[in-house]
């Protein structure tokens, strides 16, 4: 039976370095996925993943055992990404064609085997994702971060609130405003989906982003 997070932390605090390796193995894909959504490229995501685990190693002795360890890690990863973006003075944000394999040698998702095999439907979907990407980048950072945690990481409202240290009501309102803003952007652009008109632009947008 695998050791719990609490057991691994306690072992690490007693000097067992191998327990930290297990923590890295357990959470590195989730951290990398979050970093990739923020940066939009693999190189920066890998650097930020490494920086996050350096911070985890440094701050782990101060971890409070009455808190959720996964939430604590997400908070560190989220703050690491935001620090990076503020220093860069740009928010490139997520890659829509995210890797299929988050491990070593991750392969970007392609829409077809080669140019001749890509159908018009696939081309329309690819164009839509690019439009969604551009629209998403126009959102304020506070709306982007809650949407990344909710739509991409699949976290609950209370988990997001704990990570960002804001009330649940604020999380919900930011998500609602972000979805409304996306809907407005898409209404103005009069975008079409690959199959039909965007009847519920904001919802379809978020569905496309999560692919």
Image: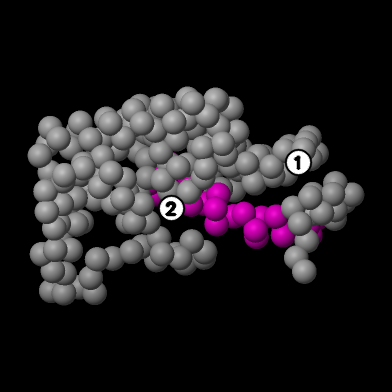
Q: In which quarter of the image is residue 89?
A: top left
Specify the label residue 60 is tagged with.
1
Q: Quadrant of residue 57?
A: top right
Q: In the image shown, does 151 or 78 lie closer to the viewer?
A: 151
Q: Residues within 10 Å of mark 2 (few under 14, many from 20)?
A: many
Mark with earlier residue (2, 1) = 2
Q: How is the image coloured?
A: one colour
Residue range (magenta):
17-44
Q: Residue at x 77, y 38 (%)?
A: 66
In the displayed structure, 188 sits above or below 8; it is above
* Main secondary structure of the magenta stretch: helix
> Can you give x and y, in whole percent of width and height, for residue 24 in the image?
66, 55
Q: Residues within 10 Å of mark 1 (few under 14, many from 20)?
A: some
Specify the label residue 151 is tagged with.
none
Q: Quadrant of the C terminus?
A: bottom left
Q: In which quarter of the image is the N terminus?
A: bottom right
Q: Distance between the residues labelled 2 and 1?
A: 26 Å
Specify the label residue 42 is tagged with.
2
Q: Please say whether residue 177 is one of the residues in the magenta stretch.
A: no
């Amino acid at each position: 039976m695998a050791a719990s997070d609490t057991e691994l932390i306690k072992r690490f605090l007693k000097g067992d370095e191998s327990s930290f390796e297990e923590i890295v193995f357990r959470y590195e894909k989730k951290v990398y996925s979050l970093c990739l959504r923020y940066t939009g490229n693999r190189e920066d995501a890998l650097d930020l993943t490494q920086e996050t685990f350096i911070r985890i190693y440094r701050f782990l002795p101060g971890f409070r055992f009455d808190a959720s360890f996964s939430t604590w890690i997400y908070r560190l990863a989220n703050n690491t990404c935001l620090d990076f973006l503020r220093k860069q003075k740009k928010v490139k944000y997520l890659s829509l064609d995210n890797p299929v394999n988050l491990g070593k040698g991750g392969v970007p998702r392609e829409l077809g085997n080669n140019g001749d095999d890509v159908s018009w439907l696939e081309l329309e979907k690819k164009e839509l994702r690019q439009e969604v990407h551009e629209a998403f980048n126009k959102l304020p950072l506070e709306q982007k971060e809650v949407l990344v945690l909710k739509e991409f990481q699949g976290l609950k409202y209370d988990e997001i609130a704990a990570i960002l240290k804001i009330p649940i009501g604020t999380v919900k309102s930011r998500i609602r405003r972000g979805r409304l803003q996306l809907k407005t952007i898409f209404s103005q652009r009069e975008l079409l989906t690959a199959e039909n008109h965007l009847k519920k632009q904001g919802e379809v947008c978020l569905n496309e982003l999560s692919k």
